[in-house]
């Protein structure tokens, strides 16, 4: 292949090898859903599906069938199903061999929530937004109690630390240890699984300087001062603003100073990926190598005769990429991105075709061979799908964005390429992002402005400022460069604030697809990229449509059944209930809520409600304004389509109240007060009767004013829902006439002793009692006294802390309740008759 200096003097658009241009600009000439994958790449896909079978066995088997079907449709079926199945089994065996063994048992002092003195060795330190650090400790043991190490690693979250522990050193700290357990509500993020795959089974939390560690005994490892010194140098130069926090995060990977509001704005704008170091940022750094190669060509054009510019750019970018990956903490996602860039660079140096797609496969082989459990890392999934989407979908847009003469047209062409690349990546990621996050930010045009400014102004200025700070600490040049980068970043955040204030950063809640719908959508995107009119192609399109339609048809058939349901969601120490009626109507009673910035509505309640269903609710009821019942409703009211909103005539105060009112205004909802004697018609002879509070009832305690509801179906009491009502409120509604009997009782105030009423239990006569409370909660809910009182009536007590989501269903008017638990798939059947 002949190279010349003249060929590469016409601008960056022609500085890429013809092979890469063929990948980016070539259009598909026939239907080929396998995209000409090599044999080993098809087998590797089967291997990857075997890895995924650890968590998603049935979906992985269906994916294997699709790989075989697409390979056959492209007439590349020399690998029969048995060979694909063999590599599938190899992947399944490999991931199971590398999966950490779960903790066999939990020590009694952990279950007792005792504050103890712990000792362990620091193996990893990572900064988190909101002034937090996460420290992984190995060999953790209790110093002031029974001997023996805790199995696996312990995750230590330290809020507002006064220093950062050093990797390799032994530390001691006082804290309460708890097993890592996520929310047992389907659709919520699998927190326990995420940490279990990293070998972490326990967690501790401390706050402030008093929560810091005491020095441990024994020899101490040396402080890796170089990376910390670079961080301190960057910290001295950046502005003390959120723009400065952005620069610090982009240059060193330290997101410690980023505030929740900054991340919220970035998520609303669809730009959150730009604030966490990934392959995107390594790409910007690699572009510096391309710029250096271009500079060499301007100074000595004849250098290209010996070494073509693309290869020179690879060699110049390699040390920059490695140095940036080392500087950025380094995070696993950054290391994996460096592997991808290394693969692409190697293929470019070897003059290979299809650099983007083949390099992706090479990197994934290396990554998953070393760490098969990385296949479940969302960051790797998103990176791989984004690159694949750019490689496969970009050719569809190539003919429409050919560069023209003139500087203006070249700039417009560059902006169009950024937009097209963002669009391709967004389309490829759409099924997965909607499944994981349930929202979509339709602000893709912001990428055209944000990413170039970030990658070609903020990041280079920040890196140059850091280098100047280190090499010339006595000069002000480094600080000026870092301050300039901070000012630009601050201006970008100001723009986002302005757009958000004008309502131009909408976030749309969507139906969260089930796994057949994800497979179907992915298959349709593949068929789009391999467009054609062959019979085999139409068959795959029909299969994709069928996979997307069948789950919704199944949901619609289930909604037509004559069935009423009540779901007690596992929201930790809070409460959120979902009433389901024939015809698919749903009413949410409370939305849960925890302390801090964690949003139960967006992380637990919303994902469950939108799992396989549109984000629509016929009604939302807030029983009282306490945070553990009301905080999650802000996200629901702001994202879902809600028919009506009811409350007990009291809204939350402070920031929570402001957020709730803003969400109602944005949704066009009016708060409607409920009083004893009112009822909500949910259709099909299903109503929610209000027992409390009566007009004129007054109590300074928020809990006593809670709405007490009874779920009735065709005149029969199914469930009594007393929220957090206490003794005064219970006595008040027990004095009033009217039926109280119900098959199911949701215990008042999470099963606390203040909500215990034997008379209430007796008059309700439940066949089962349900309790919504947090795992190992500090209050000891449900109380032993409440459990004893129910046992005396022969009524079993089921708790979300033990079983996760509790789902109750009544199949017919005269049938008893059937309670199913999310944990372990357990089911409890209770007779309809009462003693």
Image (cartoon, grey):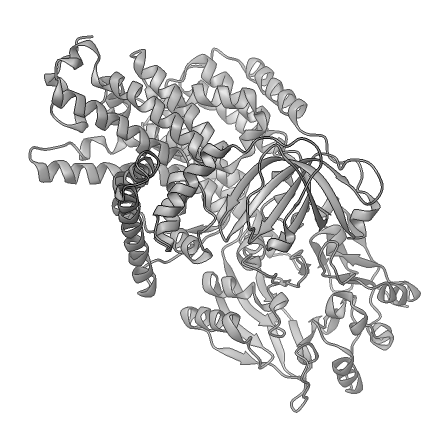
Do we see residue 453 in this rendering?
Answer: yes
| Along the line of sight, the residue nearer the viewer: 457 or 443 | 457
As drawn, 346 above or below 340: above
Residue drawn at x 39%, y 50% as measured from the top left: 245
Left or right of 697? Residue 282 is left
View extreme (front): residue: 474
Q: Give how far across and how far down residue 328 sits, in percent.
A: 44, 35
Left or right of 400? Residue 368 is right
As drawn, 213 above or below 18: below
As drawn, 6 above or below 751: above
Asked where in the image residue 735 lies, by quadrant, the reply is bottom right
From the image, which quarter does the C terminus lie in? bottom right
Do we see residue 270 in this rendering?
Answer: no
View extreme (bottom): residue: 696
Q: Give how far across and how far down residue 49 sits, in percent.
A: 55, 26
| Along the line of sight, the residue nearer the viewer: 391 or 125 | 125
View extreme (left): residue: 406
From the image, which quarter does the N terminus lie in? top left
Q: Give how far across and how far down residue 789 sits, in percent.
A: 89, 67
Left or right of 568? Residue 369 is left
Left or right of 834? Residue 384 is left
| Along the line of sight, the residue nearer the viewer: 729 or 721 | 729
Q: Give how far across and how far down residue 389 sits, in percent.
A: 37, 32
Asked where in the image residue 193 lies, by quadrant, the reply is top right
Asked where in the image residue 393 lies, by quadrant, the reply is top left
| Along the line of sight, the residue nearer the viewer: 240 or 281 | 240
How many circles with numbers are drawn on the protein? 0
């Amino acid at each position: 292949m002949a190279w010349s200096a003249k060929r590469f003097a016409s601008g960056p658009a022609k500085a890429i090898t013809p092979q890469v241009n063929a990948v980016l600009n070539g259009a598909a000439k026939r239907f080929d859903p396998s995209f000409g994958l090599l044999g080993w790449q098809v087998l590797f896909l089967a291997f990857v599906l075997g890895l995924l079978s650890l968590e998603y066995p049935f979906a992985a088997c269906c994916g294997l069938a699709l790989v075989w079907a697409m390979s056959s449709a492209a007439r590349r079926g020399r690998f029969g199903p048995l060979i694909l199945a063999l590599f599938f089994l190899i992947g399944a065996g490999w991931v199971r061999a590398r999966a950490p063994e779960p903790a066999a048992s939990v020590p009694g002092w952990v279950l007792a929530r005792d504050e103890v003195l712990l000792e362990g060795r620091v193996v990893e330190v990572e900064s988190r937004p909101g002034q937090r650090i996460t420290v992984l400790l190995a060999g953790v043991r209790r110093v002031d109690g029974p001997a023996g190490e805790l199995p696996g690693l312990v995750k230590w979250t330290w809020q507002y630390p006064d220093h950062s522990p050093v990797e390799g050193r032994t530390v001691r700290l006082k804290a309460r240890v708890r097993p890592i357990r996520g929310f047992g509500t389907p659709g919520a993020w699998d927190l326990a699984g995420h940490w279990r795959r990293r070998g972490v089974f326990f967690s501790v939390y401390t706050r402030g300087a008093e929560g810091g560690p005491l020095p441990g005994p024994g020899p101490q490892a040396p402080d890796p001062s170089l990376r910390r010194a670079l961080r301190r140098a960057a910290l001295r130069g950046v502005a003390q603003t959120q723009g400065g926090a952005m620069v610090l995060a982009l240059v060193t990977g330290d997101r410690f100073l980023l505030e929740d509001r900054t991340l919220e704005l970035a998520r609303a704008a669809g730009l959150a990926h730009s604030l966490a170091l990934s392959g995107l940022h390594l790409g910007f750094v690699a572009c510096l190598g391309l710029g250096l190669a271009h500079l060499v060509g301007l100074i000595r054009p004849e250098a290209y005769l010996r070494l073509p510019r693309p290869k020179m750019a690879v060699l110049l970018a390699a040390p920059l990429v490695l140095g940036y990956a080392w500087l950025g903490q380094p995070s696993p996602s950054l290391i994996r991105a460096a592997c991808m860039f290394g693969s692409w660079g190697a293929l470019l140096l070897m003059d290979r075709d299809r650099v983007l797609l083949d390099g992706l496969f090479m990197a994934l082989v290396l990554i998953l061979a070393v760490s098969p459990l990385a296949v479940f890392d969302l960051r790797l999934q998103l990176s791989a799908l984004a690159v694949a989407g750019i490689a496969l979908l970009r050719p569809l847009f190539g003919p429409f964005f050919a560069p023209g003469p003139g500087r203006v047209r070249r700039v417009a062409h560059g902006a169009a390429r950024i937009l097209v690349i963002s669009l391709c990546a967004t389309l490829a990621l759409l099924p997965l992002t909607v499944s994981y996050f349930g929202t979509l930010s339709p602000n893709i045009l912001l990428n055209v402005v944000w990413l170039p400014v970030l990658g070609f102004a903020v990041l280079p200025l920040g890196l140059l400022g850091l280098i100047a700070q280190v090499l010339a600490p006595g000069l002000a040049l480094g600080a000026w460069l870092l301050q300039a980068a901070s000012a630009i970043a601050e201006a970008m955040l100001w723009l986002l604030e302005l757009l958000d204030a004008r309502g131009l950063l909408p976030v749309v809640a969507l139906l969260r697809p089930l796994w057949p719908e994800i497979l179907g959508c992915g298959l349709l995107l593949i068929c789009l990229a391999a467009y054609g009119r062959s019979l085999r192609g139409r068959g795959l399109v029909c299969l994709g449509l069928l996979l997307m339609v069948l789950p919704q048809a199944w949901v619609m058939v289930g909604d037509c059944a004559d069935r009423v349901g009540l779901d007690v969601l596992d929201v930790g120490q809070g409460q959120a209930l979902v009433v389901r009626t024939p015809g698919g109507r749903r009413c949410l009673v409370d939305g849960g809520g925890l302390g801090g910035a964690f949003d139960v509505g967006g992380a637990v309640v919303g994902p469950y409600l939108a799992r396989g269903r549109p984000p629509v609710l016929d009604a939302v009821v807030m029983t009282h304004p306490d945070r553990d019942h009301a905080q999650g409703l802000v996200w629901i009211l702001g994202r879902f389509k809600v028919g009506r909103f009811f409350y007990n005539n009291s809204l939350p105060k402070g920031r929570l109240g402001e957020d709730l009112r803003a969400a109602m205004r944005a949704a066009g909802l009016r708060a409607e007060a409920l009083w004893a004697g009112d009822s909500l018609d949910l259709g099909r002879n299903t109503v929610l009767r209000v027992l409390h509070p009566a007009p004129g009832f007054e109590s300074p305690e928020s809990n006593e004013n809670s709405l007490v509801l009874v779920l009735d179906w065709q005149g029969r009491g199914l469930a009594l829902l007393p929220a957090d009502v206490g003794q005064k409120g219970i006595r008040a509604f027990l004095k009033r006439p009217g039926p109280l009997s119900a098959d199911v009782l949701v215990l008042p105030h999470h099963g606390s002793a203040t909500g215990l009423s034997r008379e209430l239990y007796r008059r309700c006569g439940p066949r089962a009692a349900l309790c919504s409370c947090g795992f190992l909660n500090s209050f000891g809910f449900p109380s032993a006294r409440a459990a004893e009182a129910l046992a005396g009536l022969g009524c079993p007590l089921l708790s979300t802390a033990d079983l996760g989501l509790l789902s109750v269903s009544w199949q017919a008017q005269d049938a008893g309740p059937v309670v199913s638990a999310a944990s372990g798939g357990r089911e409890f059947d209770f007779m309809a008759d009462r003693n």
